[in-house]
C-alpha cells in the first residue's frame, strides 16, 4: 500500500504503537508523514517515538482531532483537524491517509465461551486451537501479533491442519457418538 504514495505527503491518524510503526515504515518511502494524535501525548513505546522523532520527514501533531477529509471524489487532497488546545481548524495538504486508531475484534458473542485477551482477541495455541478442544481460530481475531494478510493466511493453514489432525485423532469418538 505504502508504495502507492512514493514521493508524496501522507498522514497517519493515531499515535499509538501501530500508528508510529506505520509512520516510520512510510517515512522510508513517502516524502513526508504527518502523525495526528488526539491525546496530548503519544501512546507509542518510547523507543518508537525516539526513532520517529529522529527521522527528518515525520511531523507529530498532538491534540489534533481529525474532522474532515477533502478530495475531488477520486483522490484525497487534504485533511482538516481541530487543534484541541486552541480550538483552531487547520488543514494538512496530502495525498493519502492511514488510519491507525486500533481495531476491535468482533468477538463479543464469544465472551465466556473461549479464552480471550482483555482486548477480545481469541487465545490460540500453536495449532490454532482455542481453549475448547476441537474449536479453532485464525487470523486477526486471534491474539497473535502482526495483523497482516500473509500472517492471517498462514494461521488459517495452521488452524486447518490443526482441525484435520484433531478430527483424525478423535474420529472414533465422533463415529461412536454418531452411531
Ligand atoms: C485499512 C487497512 C489496510 C490494510 N492494509 C494491509 C496491507 O497493505 N497488507 C497486509 O498484509 N494487510 C493489510 N491489512 C490487514 C489485513 O486486512 C488483515 O490482516 C487481514 O484481512 C486479516 O484477515 P482475516 O481473515 O483474519 O480477517 P478479515 O479479513 O477481517 O476477515 C474476517 C471475516 O470474518 C467475517 N466475520 C466477522 N464476524 C463473523 C461472524 N460472527 N461469523 C461469520 N463471519 C464473521 C467478517 O465479515 C470478515 O469477512 C489492512 C487492514 C486495514 C484495516
Image (tube, helix red, strand yellow):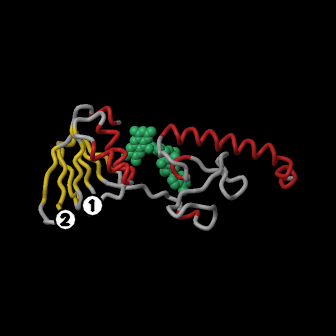
Q: Could you say whether the residue bearing mark 1 is in a helix, strand or loop?
A: loop
Q: Which residue is more in the foreground, 23 or 123?
A: 23
**Which element type, helix, strand or loop, lies under badge 2?**
loop
User: Which label was assigned to residue 84?
Assistant: 2
Image coordinates for residue 176, horizontal then vertical, percent: 87, 52
Circle count:
2
User: In which quarter of the view is residue 57 placed?
Assistant: top left
Where is residue 55? Give x, y as percent.
Answer: 27, 41
Task: Please give the name of the residue rendered at 21% of the width and 43% of the height, measured from the top-left corner.
Answer: 76
Question: In the picture, which quadrant includes the N terminus?
Answer: top left
Q: Quadrant of residue 159?
A: top right
Q: Can you say whether 154 is above or below 172 in the image?
A: above
Residue identifier under label 1: 38
Q: Is residue 94 left or right of residue 169?
A: left
Q: Residue at x 17, y 60 (%)?
A: 82
Q: Is residue 167 above or below residue 111?
A: above
55 or 118: nearer the eye?
55
- At 28% from the left edge and 63% from the top edge, which residue is drawn? 39
Would you say 130 lies left or right of 46 here? Answer: right
How far from the left and from the top, in percent, is residue 115? Answer: 62, 61
Label 2 CB less than 8 angstroms from ligand 1: no
- On the image, the x and y values in percent for residue 103 come to 42, 55
- Of residue 130 and residue 135, the one placed in the foreground of this image is 130
Answer with left or right where residue 28 lies relative to residue 145.
left
Q: Which mark is residue 128?
A: none
Q: CA distance from mark 2 to mark 1?
A: 8 Å
Callout 1 crowding tier (Cα within 10 Å): few <14, some 14–19, many ≥20: many
Q: Earlier in the sequence, mark 2 or mark 1?
A: 1
Query: Who is closer to the viewer here, 77 or 101?
Result: 101
Label 1 near label 2: C-beta < 8 Å? yes
Relative to 128, 152 lies left or right: left
Residue at screen point 17% across, 46% down: 78
Amino acid at each position: 500500500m505504502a508504495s502507492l504514495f512514493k514521493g508524496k505527503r501522507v498522514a497517519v491518524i493515531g499515535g499509538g504503537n501501530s500508528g508510529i510503526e506505520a509512520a516510520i515504515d512510510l517515512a522510508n518511502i513517502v516524502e513526508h508523514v504527518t502523525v495526528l494524535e488526539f491525546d496530548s501525548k503519544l501512546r507509542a513505546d518510547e523507543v518508537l517515538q525516539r526513532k520517529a522523532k529522529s527521522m527528518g520527514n515525520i511531523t507529530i501533531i498532538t491534540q489534533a482531532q481529525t474532522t474532515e477529509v477533502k478530495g475531488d471524489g477520486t483522490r484525497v487532497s487534504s485533511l482538516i483537524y481541530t487543534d484541541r488546545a486552541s480550538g483552531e481548524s487547520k488543514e494538512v495538504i496530502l495525498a493519502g491517509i492511514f488510519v491507525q486508531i486500533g481495531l476491535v475484534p468482533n468477538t463479543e458473542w464469544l465472551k465466556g465461551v473461549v479464552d480471550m485477551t482483555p482486548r477480545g482477541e481469541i487465545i490460540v495455541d500453536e495449532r490454532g486451537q482455542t481453549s475448547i478442544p476441537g474449536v479453532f481460530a485464525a487470523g486477526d481475531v486471534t491474539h497473535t501479533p502482526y495483523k497482516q494478510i500473509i500472517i492471517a493466511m498462514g494461521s488459517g493453514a495452521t488452524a486447518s491442519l490443526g482441525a484435520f489432525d484433531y478430527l483424525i485423532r478423535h474420529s472414533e469418538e465422533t463415529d461412536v457418538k454418531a452411531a
